[in-house]
Image: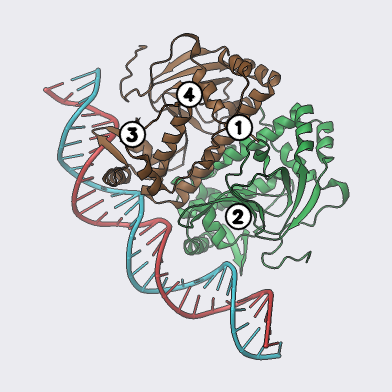
Chain colours: A green, B brown, C red, D cyan
Amino acid sequence: MPSDMPPSTPDIAPPPPPGEERLDIFVRKLLSHSSLAPDDREVLRALPYTPRRLDAGDYVLREGDRPDVCPLLLSGFAYRHKLAADGGRQIVALKIPGDPLDLQSLFLRVADHNLQTLTAADLAIVPIAALEELVKARPAIARALLVDILVEASIGREWLLNIGRRNALARLAHFLCELVYRLHLTAPQPLDMIDVPITQEQLADLLGLTPVHINRTLKTLEGAGGITRRGRRLTIGKVEVLHGIADYSDIYLHRGLQTA
Amino acid sequence: MPSDMPPSTPDIAPPPPPGEERLDIFVRKLLSHSSLAPDDREVLRALPYTPRRLDAGDYVLREGDRPDVCPLLLSGFAYRHKLAADGGRQIVALKIPGDPLDLQSLFLRVADHNLQTLTAADLAIVPIAALEELVKARPAIARALLVDILVEASIGREWLLNIGRRNALARLAHFLCELVYRLHLTAPQPLDMIDVPITQEQLADLLGLTPVHINRTLKTLEGAGGITRRGRRLTIGKVEVLHGIADYSDIYLHRGLQTA
DNA sequence: CGTGCGGTTGATGTAAATCAACCCATGTGG
DNA sequence: CCACATGGGTTGATTTACATCAACCGCACG
């Protein structure tokens, strides 16, 4: 049953790094917006956890759950989503490698949304007690985790603008831009040709559109040179092109040591 | 210049309570989602602040600002908004009496959105130092403030669902429902006939629609019995009607002592 | 007593939804 | 190894919810 080649969605996750450095990507994510002293980083990397491998589409958390652990996303993608009464679905957040998946459950009793993997994914399940201890003992770490929460909220506000006020083409380009920039946060090397392992239906749920319309919009975006597609594979081409179409500015990501 | 009768928008704010109990509504807001010991409440109520009266439409904060104080909203309404390149505007949060307006600036250096009053409003400007001291000395207060941030984020996710996946009528009804419930948090008495002091253009920017379409949607919502209008005055009638139209559930508000 | 902002209304336009096929790759079971 | 099922993806025809454009109205206030 545990297979390195998950069936449906192509596994874009890089192979899990060897040995004891697996939480490093999480630390790098925090460093993208907060500064942490070397010993703080060390303590974070030494957090106890149990690894967990999920297939594409597995649920991490369901609305109404009362979770008691804190999962970190080490590889693969995941997303939060909510359902309307008529069956409509809205993806309200996309999580990438390095992101903590459920900090809020440390403080809110019941989950207000669903959390599902987009691709096969590796999680690190951290016991809450360990995290709480760190938060108590290490103000800088507590602050970094809080900033991470605030940045996710800021991204949510930008999504509201995107969905509420931009047309399909700009919406799509904006999302792809954001994806490039966010992936760049934990991957210092230049990221030009990014493979986006997302289905057209998922893109639709993410952007408040229809799969059919996503299909057509992808085509015109390809015509404009922003992306290239071969079969089911969507890769980002010229980020500058997306920029122009998307009216993109990344201050809302609060990159760099933006901590006040 | 300081006048008790602001010019343009009708002042829905109740007259500021007398004497030293002005921060009480802020404490009640926190108590709506967190439990605080009597002495914690007392300390909060005793926070130092300078009162500030704003007219409708005044800016509290602009995108790019580096604020160094923490304003609380004691009376009146305010909202956060972001602008698109084509001039489109999206309101991304509505703040009601009792809400802290800018906790995030304690932790993020630059503001990622604009913050503007909707009506005339009374603020309490709390020096950051005082708040930081409380947060350090009182874990329960720190936790309550964090939960407040998390609940706002949860509301933002619900707005994404609302704007991304519901039609104009449901969207409008959902927003009005939320408003009733949130006002109820700090006002224990039953709230049936609520006056909503919001312009149709602002409603449009809030829901990702056009003023014209808001106008027509209001008319059909009135026809359905959800609201009543006399001239420029919009008041909420039957909340149950709105419920039915809006597909509303309030778990996302995390009411009650939901702290984990 | 104008002036202006916000509201109202109708006519028209259009971006995106819906409906309905059909295609193609992959996986599966006979 | 083929038959078939399945889940995306693609494409065209049609519909529709909402936007846009353009008046006009009416209260508030200066």
For the residue pair A149 and B82, the one nearer the viewer reads as: A149
Name the mark on residue B147: 1
The quarter of the rendered structure image containing the N terminus of chain A is bottom right
For the residue pair A190 and A43, the one nearer the viewer reads as: A43
Labels 1 and 4 touching (C-beta < 8 A): no
Q: Earlier in the sequence, mark 4 or mark 3?
A: 4
Q: Are marks 3 and 2 on the same chain?
A: no
Q: Secondary structure at mark 4?
A: strand
Q: Quadrant of residue B43?
A: top right
Tell me: A59 left or right of D14.
right
Q: Locate residue D1, reporting x and y percent.
A: 71, 90
Q: Secondary structure at mark 2?
A: loop
Q: Residue at x 66, y 40 (%)?
A: A105
Tell me: B149 left or right of A161.
right
Label 2 packing within 10 angstroms: few (<14), some (14-19), many (20+): some
Q: Is residue B59 above or below residue B242?
A: above
Instruction: Name the residue type under label 1.
Output: Val
Q: Quadrant of residue B104?
A: top right
Q: Which residue is mark 4?
A: B60
Disc number lying in front (1 or 4):
1
